[in-house]
Image (cartoon, helix red, strand yellow):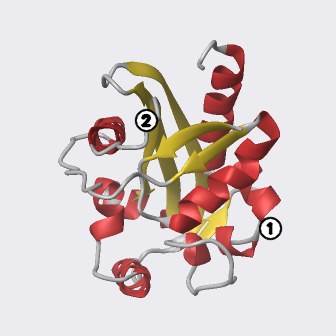
Amino acid sequence: MFKIVLATSNKHKVEEMNSVSVQFGICFVMPDEGFNPIEDGSTFEENSYAKALAAAQCEKSGRNYFMADDSGLCVDFLNGVPGLKSARYAPTAQQRIDKLLNALKDANENERNAKFICSLVLIDKTGSVLNKTTGICKGKIAHNQCGEGGFGYDPIFIVENKNKTMAELSQDEKGKVSHRGRALMDMLMWIKCSNLK
């Protein structure tokens, strides 16, 4: 297995990505101790790079490649909010969902459109960018939570053309349609065709 450090402290994210990457012979692992990125970029891509670089800088195990994603939920009615601050919109996952649903209480059906955006950046141990990909998943915000799978805003995001929330999809379904799944598939295809060792 070709190992890449995934710059995250979210074990769910590592498991989710590994469920897709294993077929490519690629395995993502958590960063070494001391991983503490500062996400102060003005775009998802800038934040992805900052996280990947932070993982490279705390690397002690001799690994050479580092990948990070930054993603967020952008809601039309709220002019793109929570956007870059999706993970910091409120202190806990449930509070973030509650706050968003409350912010949309006056939005009609046509105003609940939203999209998940994911930016992936792959770098080497020197910080040089090797590849970047972006994935988008369109949908709308539900009125109530539904589904047990996934994490974050998944229980209130109804995937376009699916009539299900992201949390109601199987891992396989989610991998094919999610913003992270789409960005990841493009990245994995690139890695497979490259000469990374």
Relative to residue 3, is residue 128 depicted above or below? above
Question: Could you tell me which secondary element the residue under label 1 belongs to?
Answer: loop
Indicate the quadrant where residue 182 lies.
Answer: top right
Is 137 displayed left or right of 100 in the figure?
right
Q: Which residue type does callout 1 highlight?
A: Ser
Q: How many marks?
A: 2
Left or right: where 131 falls relative to 161: left
Write down the residue under mark 2: 62
The residue drawn where x is 28% and y is 60% is 85
Q: Earlier in the sequence, mark 1 or mark 2?
A: 2
Q: What residue type is disc 2 on?
A: Gly
Q: Position of residue 33 (x, y in %)?
A: 33, 58
Q: Is residue 90 left or right of residue 4?
A: left
Residue at 38% over, 53% down: 32
> Residue 30 — which label?
none
Work out which quarter of the rendered image holds the C terminus and state it. top right
Callout 2: SS: loop
Quadrant of image for the N terminus = top right
Instruction: Say few, some or many: other residues with alpha carbon within 10 Å of mark 1 (under 14 / 14 to 19 / 20 or more).
Output: few
Residue drawn at x 40%, y 77% as measured from the top left:
104
Please provide percent x and percent y for residue 23: 82, 41
Residue 98 at what x, y percent from top left? 40, 87
Front residue of 76/42: it is: 42
Q: Position of residue 16 (x, y in %)?
A: 65, 59
Residue, far front? 61
Pointer 1 residue: 170
Vertical comparison of 128 with 79: above or below: above
Label 1, label 2: how far apart the Cα atoms are: 35 Å
Q: Residue at x 81, y 58 (%)?
A: 172
Q: Nearer the viewer, residue 138 or 46?
A: 46
Asked if 134 appears above or below 78 in the picture, the reply is: above
Neighbor class of circle 2 (other Cα within 10 Å; few <14, some 14-19, many 20+) is few
